[in-house]
Amino acid sequence: MKEKIITVDNLSFRYGANKVLDNVSFIVEKGDFVGIIGPNGSAKSTLLKLMIGLLKPSKGTITLFGKDINEFKNFEKIGYISQNVRDFNQMFPATIEEIVSANLYLGKGLFNKTKEKDSMKVDRALRIVEMERFKNVKIGNLSGGQKQRVFIARALVNNPNILFMDEPLVGVDLESQTRFYSLMDKLNKEYGITLVMISHDIGIMSKKVNRILCLSKGKVYCHDSNKCQCGNVLTDIYGESINLLFHDH
């Protein structure tokens, strides 16, 4: 029996009087690659933020690694790449090494730094995403796909057990998307990292992930990826006019 990494039970969430999630329940198991899909405004990012503790449920419970999220403290087990990284200041005068290593010191006092050990962690993270030779390059001198891999390395530097990503492929070219999915496959299968990712690219997602969470009208429908292509699931979520394209990069 697989280890339960996340258990969401009867979860509801409101923005004021507007209920955006209504009695949602699902489980994410160790080794899953979970895709989250749904139309704009279906609370995909909200659900992700609830799962990592950035938002509090209006009702229901979330359990992380067997512990209630309100009591969970081991956040180094979690990697998170938000939509905000797309808006990163291009002129910020920091090297790749500095960007990645900054994530090591969140929640740590300066006197807890162990420079040699931290440097090894940064080198390992950059090596995984194949960006080690750019270690001393300024972040503003990189392409969009390279920046994306740097922020993945930043999320990996604490050696997390699970990685959350909020639409990481927006604005990234096709070649970089191909490299991205190759990297995700490596993280998931070679390094055993559980992945949870929001995306609008339903076709390629359904081929790469093993489970899909479909959000619509406050509900979450959970499927194995091969079953999400069948029946009326996507039509119910996106409407009759959906034109689903399956493609390989």
Image: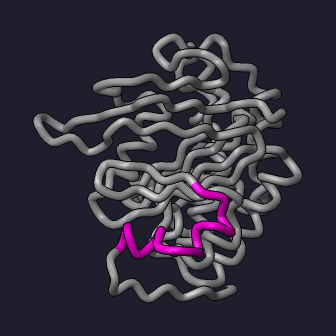
User: What's the residue at 53%, 74% (across, down)?
Assistant: 231
Q: Check the image and name the residue furthest to the right.
A: 190
Q: Which residues are magenta?
A: 223-238
**Considering depth in this image, is 23 or 48 the residue closer to the camera?**
23
Residue 181 part of the magenta-drawn span: no
Q: Position of residue 55 (x, y in %)?
A: 35, 30
User: What's the residue at 54%, 88% (across, down)?
Assistant: 245
User: What's the residue at 81%, 27% (across, down)?
Assistant: 117
Q: Is residue 169 above or below residue 247?
A: above
Q: Position of residue 153 (x, y in %)?
A: 67, 50
Q: Left or right: 13 with respect to 161? A: left
Residue 225 part of the magenta-drawn span: yes
Q: Left or right: 50 with respect to 230? A: left
**Considering depth in this image, is 150 or 219 the residue closer to the camera?**
219
**Considering depth in this image, is 161 or 90 the residue closer to the camera?**
161
Q: How many marks?
A: 0
* Image quadrant containing the C terminus: bottom right
